[in-house]
Amino acid sequence: MFYLGHLCAILMGGALPVFQIFLADSFDTFGVPDKEEQMRKIKKITIIVCSMAAGMWVLGYMYWVMLSQFSLRITRRIKKEYLEAILR
């Protein structure tokens, strides 16, 4: 859980700079004189960005859940060992 949670966090953080690339591409399409081609490019970029946002949402939720559960399990184990050490 620990490693998978961190992997999801890294992938989610790595996707943020990729957004800038697509944002720059969307700004570049406004200089195109042909409106049909401009709309086609903007639609393509919009689909990609929305897909990336959905993937980031899933990755963010996964890393939050996994790292939260991991920390709860570690805390529970430490409390149990501490209590056993006191009662001995």
Image (cartoon, helix red, strand yellow):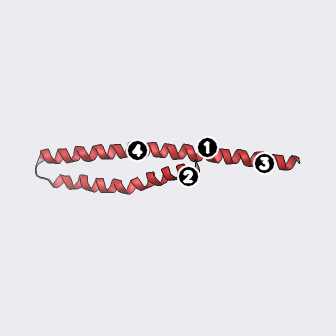
Residue type at the position of mark 1: Gln
Query: Is tag 1's residue or tag 2's residue first in the polypeptide sequence?
Result: 2
Marker disc for residue 3: 2
Q: Residues within 10 Å of mark 3 (few under 14, many from 20)?
A: few
Residues at discs 3 and 4 in contact (Cβ within 8 Å): no
Q: Earlier in the sequence, mark 1 or mark 4?
A: 4
Disc 1/disc 3 C-alpha distance (Å):
18 Å
Left or right: 82 in relation to 16: right
Q: Quadrant of residue 69?
A: top right
What secondary structure is marked by label 1? helix
User: Could you tell me residue 44's position as x and y percent?
Assistant: 24, 45
Q: Which residue is mark 4?
A: 55
Mark 4: few/some/many CA within 10 Å (<14, 14-19, 20+)? some
Give left or right: position of 78 versus 68.
Answer: right
Residue under label 1: 69
Q: How many marks?
A: 4
In this rendering, which labeled residue sits more in front, label 4 or label 2? 2
Mark nearer the N terminus (1 vs 3): 1
Q: Secondary structure at mark 3?
A: helix
Residue on which disc 3 sits = 81
Q: Position of residue 15 (x, y in %)?
A: 39, 53
Residue at horizontal 13 percent and vertical 44 percent from the top: 36
Residue at screen point 40% across, 44% down: 55
